[in-house]
């Protein structure tokens, strides 16, 4: 049964890949990757046909190994050329020693397999190892391709990775089992044809999707790091499996127990090594040192840096210290800024803020580092004091053991600070690239911390500004209370024996007490609180305004044309204050013999209240630029500059608007348009 499955499977595989090869010939696309794909598919046809013939006529396996090695080599070439963005036919035999070494090894193995089959040499065990190694290389290349390719291109390359990955994984299982059992399983061998058939449409799908086989590749240090760990672990486990098999083979009765014990010990050692932080750091250093022109993946470093700055829950100084320590992984770190002419430690890592050596560094080196914008290498300075453009005491340097670098962090806006770092553990040695990274991060952190301090100063300024605004409004309210009391005191001389005056006086005192109570509440809550709106009589409110402002001259006159019981909806007290401010401004701008008129009438759906005077008047420019600007006054210390602004804001809150017309030397007219049916 296995023979039938094998013959049929290999024959169909040969036919399937032959059709695949003919389809590739009909395409117009060219390039090295297309050539490599065509050759790989063609040699897969030869391999499948020869495998069918071997099963039928019992040919030497060496010939099949030969064609299988050529087939695998071409698949490797396709995978590698897809990974390498500029790989071409011209640099197949040139380039790195690793590439040439692998190519020469494959050619040598193929020739040896051909000779072995021709002269019937018994080297089957050696060929099993070589074929197993090829399967491991194939899986490694597929893993590299899938992890390193741009995410947007993964959908196109994924079918091929699945198809070829299935072929190489099956080969790995086949030859690993053959090494352990010292013989190839015939059932395993007969299923290779169907596996190759299943891989064909997946590879064809990728061939149709990929327009250019050389796609953009993002080579990450983490990818190489994890891939290296994977390869090392795979190689380690393969060696341990071979040694374990030997122990079982040579151990006699105790072989099985010894093999299990050896496997357990091997896994324990592997886990211990891979959990070792020291080993992982050394591996990263070696990868960075030997595989990359630059020490750092700057895009990733910048993204990590930005992610740290977005953290919440700790102080900005601790965030800044964490950000600069992240790429270097120093054991000790400290950040200090200049406040009131002296350095103050704001954040520390693995040490106290008052650490003696940190204080010594700040006293001896920090000011020089900031002044000369110099990254001070303390260990280098101990060997040669002339490497820096400033003088420092060697005795002081000899007492500094924890820290190795003093990094300035300052801005042109006046922010000054330094960062102290111990010797980095994440890198082997510090060179110009590390210093540039330190300098770039420190400059960004200086801007970040300066912005933080500026925000604090701005918040404090806004608090004072809010308090000043509130005080201005409250002063206006107090002036109204004072005007009421002054009017009552003036009239008391003539009417203090009149019972009606006494009743009015008590009402005035009650009103003043209520206003003062509100003022105290405003002050205690540190904000201006408006009362709830309610209907109020317009005529009585205007009469109150005229009476309260009658103490000053010219005395305002009221012309009321609306219905006697007409009501507005709003804050009556604030309405009275707003009109009082406008009348007071009109009095201040008029002569004693002038005239001030307060009018009220209804028009359509609006109630219009006017305050008119014949005083100094205002220019159009003043009305447009200064009249409604808060805290801008022409009265010097006598005014707060919020009367017109408060009137405009009050009217707009009610849904109305205010209109001002004025001419210099002729007077001004304020018209308040208040909606009747709108709060």
Image (cartoon, helix red, strand yellow):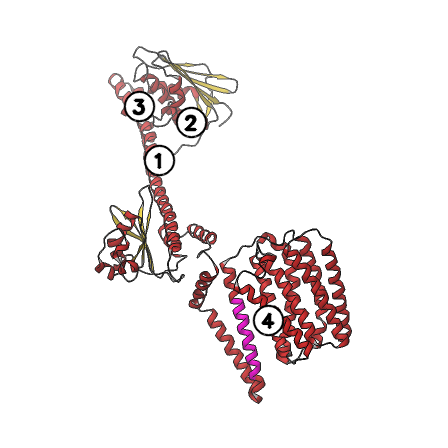
Residue 246 is covered by the magenta coloring: yes
The foreground one among 519 and 581 is 581
The spot of residue 42 in percent (x, y) is 71, 62
Q: Nearer the viewer, mark 4 or mark 1?
A: 4
Asked whether, in this view, residue 149 is left or right of residue 565, the answer is right
Q: Where does label 1 land, which residue?
A: 466
The residue range painted magenta reads 229-247
Mark 2 lies on a secondary structure that is: helix
Q: State how far apart marks 1 and 2 are (Cα).
A: 18 Å
Residue 218 is covered by the magenta coloring: no
Q: Where does label 4 land, which residue?
A: 133
Mark 3 lies on a secondary structure that is: helix
Q: Residues within 10 Å of mark 2 (few under 14, many from 20)?
A: some
Indicate which disc residue 650 carries.
2
Q: Where does label 3 land, which residue?
A: 484
Q: Residue at x 55, y 67 (%)?
A: 101
């Amino acid at each position: 049964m296995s023979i039938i499955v094998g013959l049929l499977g290999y024959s169909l595989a040969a036919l399937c890949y032959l059709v695949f090869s003919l389809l590739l010939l009909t395409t117009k696309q060219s390039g090295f990757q297309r050539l490599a794909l065509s050759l790989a598919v063609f040699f897969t046809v030869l391999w499948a046909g020869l495998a069918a013939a071997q099963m039928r006529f019992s040919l030497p396996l060496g010939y099949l190994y030969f064609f299988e090695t050529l087939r695998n080599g071409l698949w490797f070439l396709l995978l590698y050329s897809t990974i390498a963005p500029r790989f071409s036919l011209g640099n197949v035999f040139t380039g790195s020693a690793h590439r040439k070494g692998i190519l020469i090894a494959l050619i040598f193995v193929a020739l040896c397999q051909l000779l072995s089959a021709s002269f019937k040499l018994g080297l089957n065990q050696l060929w099993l190892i070589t074929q197993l190694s090829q399967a491991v290389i194939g899986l490694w290349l597929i893993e590299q391709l899938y992890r390193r390719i741009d995410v947007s291109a993964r959908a196109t390359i994924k079918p091929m990775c699945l198809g070829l990955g299935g072929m190489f994984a099956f080969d790995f299982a086949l030859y690993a089992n053959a090494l352990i059992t010292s013989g190839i399983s015939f059932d395993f061998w007969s299923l290779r044809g169907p596996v190759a058939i299943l891989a064909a449409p997946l590879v064809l799908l990728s061939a149709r999707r990929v327009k250019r086989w050389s796609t953009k590749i993002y080579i990450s240090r983490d990818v190489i790091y994890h891939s290296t760990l994977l390869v090392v672990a795979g190689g380690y486990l393969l060696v341990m499996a071979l040694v374990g098999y030997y122990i079982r083979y040579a151990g006699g009765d105790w072989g099985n127990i010894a093999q299990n014990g050896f496997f357990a010990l091997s896994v324990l050692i592997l886990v211990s090594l891979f959990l070792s932080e020291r080993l992982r750091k050394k591996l990263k250093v070696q990868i960075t040192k030997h595989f990359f022109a630059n020490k750092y993946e700057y895009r990733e470093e910048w993204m990590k840096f930005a992610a740290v700055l977005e953290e919440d829950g700790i102080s900005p100084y601790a965030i800044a210290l964490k950000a600069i320590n992240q790429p270097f992984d120093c054991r000790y770190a400290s950040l200090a800024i200049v406040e009131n002419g002296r350095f103050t430690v704001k954040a520390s890592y693995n040490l106290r803020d008052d650490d003696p050596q940190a204080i010594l560094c700040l006293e001896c080196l920090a000011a020089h580092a900031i002044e000369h914008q110099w990254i001070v290498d303390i260990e280098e300075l101990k060997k040669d004091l002339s490497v820096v453009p400033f003088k420092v005491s060697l005795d002081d340097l000899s007492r500094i053991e924890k820290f190795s670098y003093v990094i300035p962090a300052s801005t042109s806006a006046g922010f000054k600070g330094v960062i102290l770092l111990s010797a980095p553990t994440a890198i082997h040695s510090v060179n110009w690239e590390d210093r540039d990274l330190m300098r770039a991060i420190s400059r960004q952190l200086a801007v970040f911390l300066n912005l933080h301090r500026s925000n604090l100063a701005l918040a404090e300024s806004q608090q004072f500004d809010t308090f000043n605004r509130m005080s201005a409004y409250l002063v206006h309210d107090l002036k109204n209370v004072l005007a009421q009391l002054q009017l009552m005191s003036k009239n008391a001389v003539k009417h203090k024996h009149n019972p009606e005056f006494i009743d009015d006086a008590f009402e005035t005192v009650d009103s003043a007490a209520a206003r003062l109570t509100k003022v105290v509440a405003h002050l205690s809550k540190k904000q201006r609180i408006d009362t709830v709106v309610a209907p109020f009589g317009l005529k009585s409110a205007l009469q109150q305004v005229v009476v309260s402002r009658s103490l000053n001259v010219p005395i305002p006159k009221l012309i009321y044309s609306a219905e006697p019981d007409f009501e507005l909806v709003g804050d009556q007290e604030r309405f009275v204050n707003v009109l009082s401010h406008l009348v007071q401004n009109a009095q201040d701008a008029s002569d004693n013999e002038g005239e001030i008129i307060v009018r009220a009438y209804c028009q359509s759906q609006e109630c219009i209240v006017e305050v008119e005077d014949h005083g100094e008047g205002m220019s159009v420019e003043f009305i447009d630029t200064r009249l409604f600007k808060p805290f801008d006054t022409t009265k010097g210390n006598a005014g707060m500059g919020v009367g017109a602004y408060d009137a405009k804001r009050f009217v707009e809150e009610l849904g109305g608007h205010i209109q001002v017309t004025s001419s210099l030397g002729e007077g001004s007219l304020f018209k308040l348009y208040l909606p009747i049916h709108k709060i």
